Image (cartoon, rainbow, N blue to C red):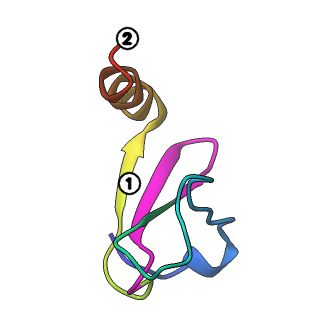
Amino acid sequence: MSTEGSAQLAWFKSSYSGNEGGACLEVAATADAVHVRDSKVPTRSQLAFRQKDWAAFVDFAAGR
């Protein structure tokens, strides 16, 4: 995925993420997708997942 247009996205990190400079991901949701990027290098390529696929991942990660 291109980073073109990513400046308009509202990116956020988890509230569990500290400011120690560790490895973090940022996400931005749109009506069509959830975008994921590396917070340390936000200009690099990003991933985009369909809403239902992201929801399934979060459920799996949460052990639901």
> What residue is pinned by disc 2?
64
Q: Tell me which amino acid carries mark 1.
A: Ala
Q: Say few, some or many: other residues with alpha carbon within 10 Å of mark 2 (under 14 / 14 to 19 / 20 or more).
A: few
Q: Say left or right for 12 vs 60.
A: right
Q: Which residue is found at the position 45% from the left and 76% from the top?
A: 39
Q: Which residue is found at the position 40% from the left and 68% from the top?
A: 37
- Report the magenta stretch's main SS: strand
Boundaries of the magenta span = 27-41
Residue 57 is marked as none
> Would you say residue 39 sits in the magenta stretch?
yes
The local secondary structure at tag 1 comes to: strand
58 is higher (above) or lower (below) than 64: below
The local secondary structure at tag 2 comes to: loop
> What residue is pinned by disc 1?
48
Q: Which residue is found at the position 69% from the left and 74% from the top?
A: 8
Where residue 14 sits in the image (x, y, percent)? Answer: 56, 54
Q: Say left or right for 39 vs 8.
A: left
Q: Say few, some or many: other residues with alpha carbon within 10 Å of mark 1 (under 14 / 14 to 19 / 20 or more).
A: some
40 vs 11, nearest the viewer: 40
36 vs 24, nearest the viewer: 24
61 is higher (above) or lower (below) than 17: above
Where residue 56 sits in the image (x, y, percent)? Answer: 36, 23
Where residue 7 sits in the image (x, y, percent)? Answer: 63, 81
Q: CA distance from mark 2 to mark 1?
A: 22 Å
